Image (cartoon, helix red, strand yellow):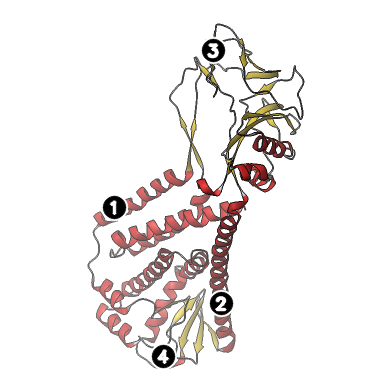
Amino acid sequence: MKMDNIVNFILESGISLSLFSLIYILFLRKETFFRLNRLFLLSSLLFSVILPFLKFQVYNTDPVMLTEITITPYRNLIEAVTVYGKDLSGSIEQAILSANAIILIYIAGLLFFLLRFLVRVAELILLIYQNPVQKMHGFKLVTLNQNIGPFSFLNYVFLSSSLERKDGYHKMIAHELEHIKQGHTFDVIILEILTAFQWFNPFMWMFQRVVRENHEYLADQAVLNSGVSRGYYKKLLLIQYAGDQFEMTNHFNYSLIKNRVRMMSKLRSSKVANGKVIFGILAAFVLVVVFACEKKESFEVGAKKEVAPLNVSALNEQLKIESASGNLRKIRQLFSGGNTGEADDDSLINIHTAQKKEEPKKLGVAEEVFFLVDEMPGFPGGDDALRQFITNSVEYPEAAIEKGLQGKVVVSFVVTKNGSIANSHIAHGVDPALDKEALRVINSLPVWTPGTHKGKAVNVSYTVPITFALDNNL
């Protein structure tokens, strides 16, 4: 997985969890439909994990009649690559160091919380091996010598030996059994791992807290539904509020006792209150639209007829554009120099350019060059890798630095059907020194994955803008 994908996962899942945490706290936390609340929390958790992997393509279905094609010298343009003069080396290095420091801090936090999780699991295993274990009906009872409040983990119930003689001993076991029956341990484990990845996000800690709080409400509700009186159970909670707290487990001491007592005393929420979960559904919809939808244009040409691709070949100082189908009513050329022209009812026009080509490699005159294809050519590693290659390869000319020269050089070239670079030339220049350096770097590009059209590898025109910038204009 690439670094940018990891960052997207952390940020998108974190934003999603934050939003659902706020919705739960504002609208659902004080309601008594605890099972529905748990479903909401677990669904929010699952949705937040898979959200970064969801990608939907949304097409614009409005038909567009293709009666005019605009041709410019800049085709298949990637985002500009900016190359700085050596005056900025210090600030660039500082930015890189800052980014690396942030990454190191995040990784340190991640490792710390993962290690803490593993240490707690190890402590639980030690408690099992160091204390008497009784096999009961459906669970195992671990009797502890330490004065620790009751808690459960997987199918183990941990109780201090000092509690065996106290009133309500079996009710405490019943409470912990509910945690086991409802699988609360698995919620806790997943939350611990996710919290390690989201340790910097305060809403993640809040989310973890409300999930565990919900666990306690569910266990309390189950014990009360078994016939235990509310008054007796409240008194039992206050009496048993003793002993140390063991983290990462379900136990009596996790939630504030007053919150649990208050929820027991509260009247059951009305069925109308169930409708508050609609806020969660709306939030999920918004998150999908913001993070998962990618808009793509869909063009319907004429009566759903396929328009043949434009075939382009370079002849000396002319750019010859052919429409194989001959069905284009009008072609207009727009160039930065201001030259325009039109060709009506004709499938062949010549466009004169003011810029002569550089000639490192040439395609044969009869070879076709495509602008629009089914699958565009790809640089090894993608556009980000292409920009990185150019940034690392360009050497800002000393003469240009001394003269204070800067600007955007646009280089056009053809990615051939075998992936090599051909017909590279300056589409828009700034200065011979900068133009020459930009052209040198483009000609040094490694082999690409060629573009394909109708299942065949083809020659495809490509354009890369390279911005040369000095410190004084930033």
Looking at the picture, how far across and down is residue 199, in whole percent? 48, 67
Residue at which label 2 appears: 121
Q: In the displayed structure, does residue 154 sit left or right of residue 352?
A: left
Residue situated furthest top in the rendering:
345
Spatial CA distance of label 3 from label 2 is 76 Å
Marks 4,2: beta carbons within 8 A? no
Q: Nearer the viewer, mark 4 or mark 2?
A: 2
Going from the N terminus, do you reach mark 3 or mark 2 first?
2
Q: Of helix, strand and loop, which one carries label 4?
A: helix
Q: Which mark is residue 341?
A: 3
- Residue 266 percent across, percent down from the top left: 23, 70
Circle 2 — which element? helix
Residue tagged by mark 4? 163
Identify the secondary structure beneath mark 3.
loop
Q: Tell me how far mark 2 sits from mark 1, CA to CA.
A: 39 Å
The answer to whether 339 appears left or right of 425 in the picture is left
Residue marked by disc 1: 275
Query: Residue 315 shows which numbered tag?
Result: none
Residue 170, picture quadrant: bottom left
Q: In terms of sequence position, does the residue under pointer 3 or pointer 4 come before the other?
A: 4
